[in-house]
Amino acid sequence: MKRKGNFYNDICNKDNIKKAIIEAAKGKKYRNNVARILENIDNYVDILFNMLDTKKIKLSPYKKMTIHDGANKKERIIFKPAFFPDQCIHWSLMLQLQPILQKGMYEYCCASVPNRGIHYGSTYIKRILKDDRKNTKYCLKLDVKKFYPSIDKNVCKRKFRRIIKDYDVLNLIDAIIDSSNESGLPIR
């Protein structure tokens, strides 16, 4: 895959920042801090623009929370970044980075990819099994225990450097990756 460069200005674009704030606010619009930002969104777009443009980004520490997830009520430790500016900056970056990452992604990778949820994956599996001449009888369901906390931050940064050549974008990614004091990547 060809390395992508010169797109930091797209991240700093005010329209991109406004869209990022709106995306970050989905499902949270009735929280007081989020509603306050949405009421005066243009002012907060300018604040984020200035932070990104001057590269003076100050990310706040994550709030550590324990949740019980799924039918089995599996205990997970998640890390919650502040809505403003952290989540808005994350979204501003991801709106520009996602198309680049998806180009090199396996077609049937479904985890955390928009429009590729469980139904997308199950439809693919059903199609495979329908056309299966070998009459597959077994299926192996796997889960990598503590996957995100086991990711080496430096390896993750090197992977980004293989697909991105814009130093400003790489510095922003590094700042987000390093914003957690925990080992590995935090689950959000």
Image: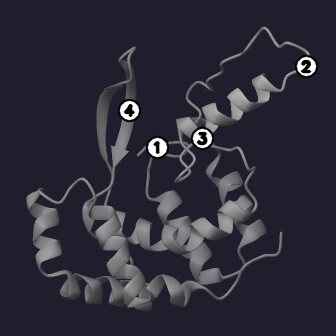
Q: Is residue 121 above or below residue 51?
A: above
Name the residue at 37% across, 22% down: 75
Query: Which numbered disc, 4 or 3, marks the residue closer to the eye?
Result: 3
Per the image, the residue denoted by label 3 is 120
Q: x, y (%) of residue 135?
A: 85, 12
Per the image, the residue denoted by label 4 is 77
Q: Is residue 128 above or below residue 167?
A: above
Name the residue at 83% across, 27% down: 131
Q: x, y (%) of residue 68?
A: 32, 24
Q: CA distance from mark 4 to mark 3?
A: 28 Å
Q: Is residue 117 above or below residue 11?
A: above
Q: Amino acid at mark 1?
A: Glu
Name the residue at 72% across, 79% down: 4
Per the image, the residue denoted by label 2 is 133
Q: How is the image coloured?
A: one colour
Per the image, the residue denoted by label 1 is 182
Q: CA distance from mark 4 to mark 2?
A: 43 Å
- Mark 1: secondary structure: loop
Residue 57 visible in the picture: yes
Q: x, y (%) of residue 157?
A: 66, 60
Q: Residue furthest front?
A: 130
The N terminus lies in which quarter of the figure? bottom right
Q: x, y (%) of residue 13?
A: 44, 89
Q: CA distance from mark 1 to mark 3?
A: 33 Å
Q: Amino acid at mark 2?
A: Arg
